[in-house]
Amino acid sequence: MSRALPIGGVLVGLLGGCNPAATPGTTGGASAGGAAGSAGDAADAGGGPNGGMGGESGGPCASASGGQPPFAGNGYFDGLSRLSGLPETECTITVTQGEISPTMATVGVVSFTTDLACLESAEIHFGLDVSYGLVAPANPSEPAFRTLLVGMKQDSTYHYRVAVSDGTSVCYGEDRTIETGALDAVATDFVALAEAWTSPDAAPGFIVTSRDGDAVIHDKDGDIVWAYPMWNVFSVHLSWDGKYVLGRDPGPFDLGYGGIFYRVGIDGSGPVELDAPGGDHHDFAAIPEGIAYLAKSAEGECDRVYEASVDLLDGTPIFDTWSIYQHFPDEGVMEGTEICHANRVRYSGAADHYTVSDRNKDAIAVFDTSGVPLLSIGKAPTSSLEQHVLAEGAGPGGDWHVQHGHHLYADDKLVVFSNSGADGGAILHYTISADSAALDWKYAGAGASEIQGDVQRLPNGNFLITANQSGAIVEIAPDGQTEVSRYVLYGPTGALYRFGYSEHRPSLYGTPPPR
């Protein structure tokens, strides 16, 4: 697939001027002031066609907005209001719908109309009191701006208000309330965490993961705000645009077929269970066009990276990781006749590349999106390999042995979850310089995990660590030692799928962080 990042048609037309006759859900005419948005797929859960309202050339409503641009609905959203600090103006806002989704008791559905002229952007602010705290970018492409409120706790009263702006001022609607329900119908086995504490230094946002094989989203307090039964899933992620939750089972490690994906709308609608092409297993990553996933094309082969739309059935192999991993010996447990055991794949939107972990190679492989090998980081290869970075302590007996989760969060910075190193399960932080990587620090306080294990560097500089078999998710400060939050599951440790791989999102709207 080509890697052309989508450009927001949702608000492009609005920024060029004002067409008072335009209505949400229709496409306005193109003008010198701004091209009209194009209609998108109305079947997308939680959103509609990406058509803007268009603008008239010139005219009295030419945008004069400054500062932070409006959120266009398909880019990175950090969860902060784009309208704070603007002077207030008067208008009429009529809420035409304010109810809980019939398929997800913690997701609200709000629609509204307004008489504000030259409407440029809109948001819904919501929270447990009138200080709100959460922001949902309103969807101007939906009839009556139909917008989902996502990230609410169970059995709670939430306040919300609509905010609309012409780019120079903001008008607020009245405070309203909405009542969430219990997720018992879809998550009967989920009890409260055995331990959940957080501090002001913890990153705001949400953790998308699995608990004992089902998909869940926890908020910063450790409360479940979304859950759906996905039998035996190993990996759960939001789609690139945040409209779907997808999960996958462990899959067959050494076959050219099999493995199950699950997909459900963020509002709980349209659940499907699908078998994507290839012997897919372990993990996948959200990409602008859909997902990238790990799979074998035949028994005994090395793993390939496939790409598919969110329909999942159109998966196509893009490249074979053997181009890098043929240079590394296997030093771990193998399944059947497999020669590779890839277990984690990440996509970086900023760098536009993939990173792949192979459990038994003690190395991370980096490829561009067409499959050209860019870099390998880890233990010494057994044959000549260009662009290899030798990592301090990588290999059997060292700090880095058998890895899963990893994050190449800058060109010269890498964190790895080492499952079987000198300290058992530990996070290793490296600084890369030329052809070597120096171990800066390590942290083993989250607990051991012989399988999975994950780490992510967060936008605020903290690190999110998941020790899957220990049933713990821990956030530590940039110093690599200071804990700022900890979530621990109930019961004894050691069950196979306590927490799965984890993904932190600052907001449940828009795309993942750029890198």
Image (tube, rainbow, N blue to C red):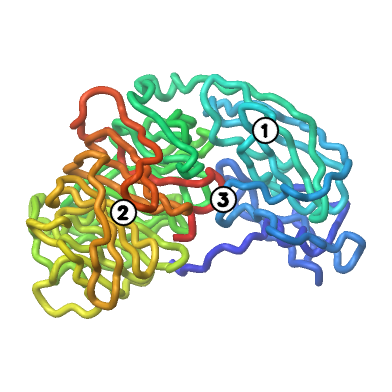
Q: In which quarter of the image is the N terminus?
A: bottom left
* 479 left or right, relative to 132: left
At label 3, counting other C-alpha atoms closer than 10 Å, the crowd grade (few under 14, some 14-19, many 20 or more) is many
For label 1, the residue is 131
**Between tags 2 and 3, which lies in front?**
3
For label 3, the residue is 78
- Which image quarter: residue 353? bottom left
Q: Which mark is residue 214?
A: none
Amino acid on which the number 2 mark rests in the picture: Pro
Distance CA(mark 2)–CA(mark 3)? 34 Å
Q: Residue at x 59, y 55 (%)?
A: 74
Q: Give the mark, 1 or 3, whose residue is nearer the N terminus.
A: 3
Q: Residue at x 63, y 41 (%)?
A: 135
Q: Where is residue 18 in the image (x, y as percent from the top left)?
A: 85, 58
- Which image quarter: residue 392? bottom left
Q: Give the mark, 1 or 2, whose residue is nearer the N terminus.
A: 1
Q: Position of residue 195 (x, y in %)?
A: 35, 27
The correct choice, above or below, for 176 with respect to 65 in the image is above
Amino acid on which the number 3 mark rests in the picture: Asp
Nearest the eye: 290 or 483: 483
Amino acid on which the number 1 mark rests in the picture: Ser
Secondary structure category for the residue under label 3: loop
Distance CA(mark 1)–CA(mark 2)? 48 Å
Q: Where is residue 296 in the image (x, y as percent from the top left)?
A: 22, 57
* 391 left or right, relative to 175: left
Nearest the eye: 393 or 47: 393
**Between tags 1 and 3, which lies in front?**
1
The correct choice, above or below, for 29 with respect to 286 in the image is below
For label 2, the residue is 277
